[in-house]
Image (spheres, rainbow, N blue to C red):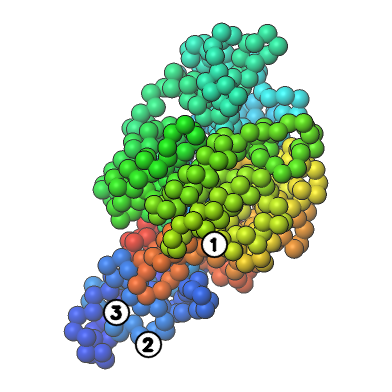
């Protein structure tokens, strides 16, 4: 991959000449980017060659002739040498704080059991810590039941081991971990039917733990999950987000910490100058016995700074198809008599959505199955019918399965359809578990982004990092490539999920990771496109993504990331 070289300099002579031409005595721009291919992602699809930044805002977009009004003696001029500039990437669905808890230890993302156990053995042999941590255990290698504590006991029986599954909703532990957590045959499940310990025929826990409450019951007995511990992990990842070109995220729920503690941590990063992204946060609600509006409004009141805002109500209504907990309109193929219940009753969800909408609170909802999608759309439609008009930014996330009759409703109701580009392929999970659960016809219609857009809806990309069904991926360029090809990097021999017609264009994918994602988190008027008056969030990439082979998109280098008018990533200083 060719690397574009960018020269940075203070151009005092040019600045002096600029003042003479314009009569403006003291131009005070902080940055001027020149000689670029600046794709603004505005409604007209404008392309400019120069952009000016001052006090965290975009003050000029256009040709070089207009720069004399911007460049002063203190302006740093960046010669882009033809490089491409885009709005900073916006992640429409992430769990940035949770990543500081989950993404620790050894990476176990592999389909090969021998490789998996080799990585675990190597970690045990080279790590002297009292607790062995890891993440990314995939489901597809386990065709004859979930992995067990006994398998891990053969490798390490004296120290506890705790490995997060790839989806973040399960964990694999050894017997020592269960012992230290006091989990045995007589231990009741944390939340019966939802968060539990998988058991053998005699009732003994097998070492496979389902859902976050049960996972944290064990993990909290093994280590002190305090704000300092999670903050250390989060800080490590913040720099990686900036290096990937991310400037804003929609956090869909803080796990591992209390919700207040999570927002306090993020605001502490902001106050210390350590937050390279802006965060729209959510009140996470998966308990129908609790009124979510009180918590949402309290967070909104307490956390509304420049970079950290608590704005959304996040609803968790169903699970996933791997555990038969996704809400589906038609029966599961392999378990036709299984009818999962919603995590929160439908009527309770509708009441909350209507009341939240009336209070000016937008909602985002985990909807995996097509019945979950329809129920949330129904609730939003009711809210629109009974409440006064307002500017709304409701969103449905995941939408793995959407009934064709509901494609058009996203546009009609102004609901953003958000999903994860890195999931949109015939990965081994889709080829095995999804195929068994819903059959080929429904499976091949998964992630109907192009269909929703063709019906007038807005589509945004969100990683759901650190969790996934198959590959945990936070880098926008990787998601964009996968969405365009409907294939994963390294698995191009597999046909595109949904066929050629399911592939997004490069422009659709870029729009989904910029302005559409910004609209989907209620910030479309502030970020997501490069227009005068908007916040100066942008990314410089080494290649024009419209012109290269889409198979190379994930390999393109991020040269600079600017957030709020400040350089948060500079490839020349690494």
Could you tell me which residue is drawn at 38 percent across and 37 percent down? 259
Q: Residues within 10 Å of mark 3 (few under 14, many from 20)?
A: many
Q: Position of residue 14 (x, y in %)?
A: 29, 83
Would you say residue 80 is visible in this rendering? Answer: yes
Left or right of 153, for residue 529:
left
Q: Which residue is mark 1?
A: 414
Q: CA distance from mark 1 to mark 3?
A: 38 Å
Classify 173 as above or below 348.
Answer: above
Residue drawn 76% across the image and 51% down it: 444
Q: Is residue 189 above or below residue 26?
A: above
Please determine whether, in this image, residue 320 is positioned above or below residue 207. below
- Residue 91's tag is none
Neighbourhood count class around disc 1 (C-alpha, 10 Å): few under 14, some 14–19, many 20 upward: some
Residue at position x 34%, y 72% in the image: 533
For residue 8, say whether it is visible. no
Q: Earlier in the sequence, mark 1 or mark 2?
A: 2
Residue under the point 59% across and 69% down: 507
Name which of mark 3 and mark 2 comes first in the sequence: 2
Residue in front for this viewpoint, 279 or 384: 384
Residue that badge 3 annotates: 70
> Marks 1 and 2: which is nearer the front?
1
Find residue 55 and report its image quarter. bottom left
Q: Badge 2 is on which residue?
A: 65
* Distance (Cα) linking label 3 and label 2: 11 Å
């Amino acid at each position: 991959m060719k690397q574009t070289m960018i020269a940075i300099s203070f151009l005092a002579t040019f600045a002096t000449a600029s003042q003479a031409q314009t009569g403006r005595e003291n131009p005070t721009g902080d940055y001027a980017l020149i000689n670029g291919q600046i794709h603004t992602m505005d409604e007209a699809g404008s392309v400019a060659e120069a952009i000016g930044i001052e006090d965290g805002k975009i003050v000029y977009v256009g040709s070089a002739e207009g720069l004399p009004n911007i460049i002063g003696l203190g302006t740093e001029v960046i010669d882009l040498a033809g490089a491409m500039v885009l709005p900073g990437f916006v992640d429409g669905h992430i769990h940035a704080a949770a990543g500081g808890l989950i993404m620790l230890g050894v990476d176990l993302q592999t389909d090969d059991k021998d490789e998996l156990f080799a990585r675990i053995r190597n970690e045990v042999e080279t790590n002297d810590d009292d607790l062995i941590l890891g993440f990314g255990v995939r489901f597809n290698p386990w065709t004859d039941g979930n992995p067990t504590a006994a398998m891990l006991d053969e490798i390490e029986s004296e120290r506890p081991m705790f490995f997060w599954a790839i989806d973040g909703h399960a964990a694999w532990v050894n017997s020592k971990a269960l012992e230290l957590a006091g989990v045995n045959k007589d231990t009741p499940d944390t939340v019966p039917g939802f968060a539990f310990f998988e058991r053998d025929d005699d009732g003994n826990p097998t070492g496979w733990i389902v859902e976050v409450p049960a996972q944290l019951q064990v993990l909290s007995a093994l280590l002190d999950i305090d704000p300092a511990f999670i903050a250390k992990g989060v800080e490590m990842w913040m720099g990686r987000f900036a290096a990937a070109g991310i400037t804003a995220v929609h956090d869909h729920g803080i796990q591992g910490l209390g919700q207040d503690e999570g927002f306090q941590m993020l605001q502490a990063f902001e106050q210390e100058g350590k937050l390279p992204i802006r965060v729209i946060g959510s009140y996470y609600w998966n308990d129908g016995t609790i009124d979510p509006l009180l918590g949402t409004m309290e967070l909104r009141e307490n956390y509304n700074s420049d970079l950290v805002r608590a704005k959304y109500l996040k609803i968790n209504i169903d699970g996933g198809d791997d555990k038969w907990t996704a809400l589906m309109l038609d029966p599961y193929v392999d378990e036709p008599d299984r009818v999962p219940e919603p995590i929160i009753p439908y009527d309770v969800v509708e009441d909350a959505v209507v009341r939240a909408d009336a209070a000016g609170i937008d909602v985002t909802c985990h909807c995996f199955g097509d019945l979950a999608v329809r129920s949330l759309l129904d609730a939003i439609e009711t809210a629109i019918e009974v409440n006064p008009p307002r500017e709304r930014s409701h969103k449905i996330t995941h939408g793995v399965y959407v009934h064709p009759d509901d494609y058009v409703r996203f546009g009609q109701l102004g609901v953003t359809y958000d999903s994860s580009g890195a999931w949109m392929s015939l990965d081994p999970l889709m080829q095995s578990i999804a195929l068994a659960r819903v059959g080929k016809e429904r499976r091949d219609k998964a992630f109907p982004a192009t269909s929703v857009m063709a019906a007038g809806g807005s589509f945004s990309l969100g990683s759901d990092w650190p969790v996934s069904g198959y590959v945990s991926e936070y880098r926008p360029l990787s998601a964009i490539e996968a969405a365009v090809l409907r294939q994963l990097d390294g698995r191009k021999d597999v046909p595109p999920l949904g066929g050629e017609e399911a592939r997004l264009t490069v422009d659709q994918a870029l729009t989904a990771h910029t302005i559409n994602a910004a609209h989907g988190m209620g910030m479309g008027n502030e970020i997501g496109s490069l227009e005068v008056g908007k916040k100066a969030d942008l990314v410089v990439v080494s290649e024009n993504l419209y012109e290269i082979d889409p198979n190379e998109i994930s390999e393109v280098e991020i040269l600079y990331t600017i957030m709020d008018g400040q350089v948060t990533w500079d490839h020349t200083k690494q």
